[in-house]
Each structure stands twice: as C-alpha cells, then as structure tokens.
Amino acid sequence: MNYKRLIVSLIMGSLLGVVCVVGANIRYSGSLANDYIFAFWFNRVLIGLFIGLLVPLNNPLHLIIRGALVGLLISFAFYSATEFLDLTGFLVGAVYGIIIEFVAKKIA
C-alpha cells in the first residue's frame, strides 16, 4: 500500500470538502444545518480515502474516468440521502474525484 498516496488523497479530499462547504453555503445563503455541512465535507473526505486506497494509474484518460466514477459513486450516497436536492454538489463530486486522482498521481 502506498501510504503517501493515501495521505495526499485524504488531505485533498479534506481541502476540497472545505471548498464544497463554502460553495454550498453561498448557494444556500448560509441556511444549511451543521449536520448537513459536516456530511457534505465528510463525503469529500471519503472520495479522497477511496481514491487513496486504489492502485495508481499512469494513463491520464484512465485517471479522468476513474476519478469521475469514484467521485460520482460516493457523491451519490450523499445526494440520495438528501432526497436528490443538490445536483450541483453531486456533479462536482466527479470533478473533485478527478482533481484528487491527478494530485495524488503528481505528488505520490
């Protein structure tokens, strides 16, 4: 197991989670409950964890596809739990998955 990849992915998931929370608060005028905000942030950390546990890939196209699929899969759990209310948050999960894949590849 590549622990450096795992740590980098977790840190990226945590940082992107903060970006996501800020974006959600802006979209919803700061009216989100604390448990919703935490779950949103934790969802991004889980994307980082999952990607960090996967075997590194070399092909950029494969990184894009896998990052997007992992991001969407994990984001779907949160999206479905919120009665499919935040489509933007769900779709951005794919973008964050791709970002995490490329940062993990570059640094680790």
Image (cartoon, grey):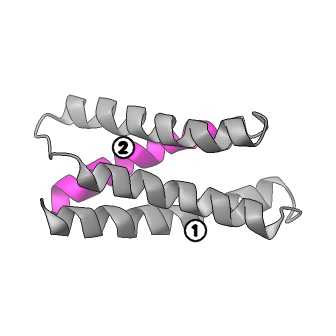
- Magenta stretch contains residue 97: yes
Residue 53 x, y percent position in the rendering? 25, 53
Q: Residue at left 35%, top 50%? A: 50
Whether residue 106 is situated above or below residue 63 in the rendered picture: below
54 lies above or below 14: above
Residue 3: x and y in percent read 17, 67
In the figure, 39 relative to 63: above or below? below
Q: Name the residue under label 1.
A: 18
Q: Distance between the residues labelled 2 and 1?
A: 17 Å
Q: Residue at x 64, y 57 (%)?
A: 40
Residue nearest the viewer, comparing 82 with 19: 82
Expressed as whole percent of the image width and height from the top left, the position of residue 21 reads: 66, 63
Residue 32 falls in which quadrant of the image? bottom right
Question: Which amino acid type is shown beneath numbered disc 2?
Answer: Ile
User: Any magenta on residue 29?
Assistant: no
Say which mark, if any, is on residue 98. 2
**Which residue shows up at 51% across the image and 56% down it?**
44
Q: What element carries label 2?
A: helix
Task: Tell me if I can see residue 43 in this picture.
Answer: yes
**Mark 2 Cα-neighbour bin, 10 Å: few <14, some 14–19, many ≥20:** many
Q: Which of marks 2 and 1 is nearer the N terminus?
A: 1
Q: Give the range drawn in magenta.
A: 90-108
Could you tell me which secondary element the residue under label 1 belongs to?
Answer: helix
Q: Which of 29 and 43 is in front in this view?
A: 43
The prevailing secondary structure element of the residues shown in magenta is helix
| Residue density around tag 1, few if under 14, some if 14–19, many if 20 or more, within 10 Å | some
Location of the N terminus by quadrant is bottom left
* Number of marks: 2
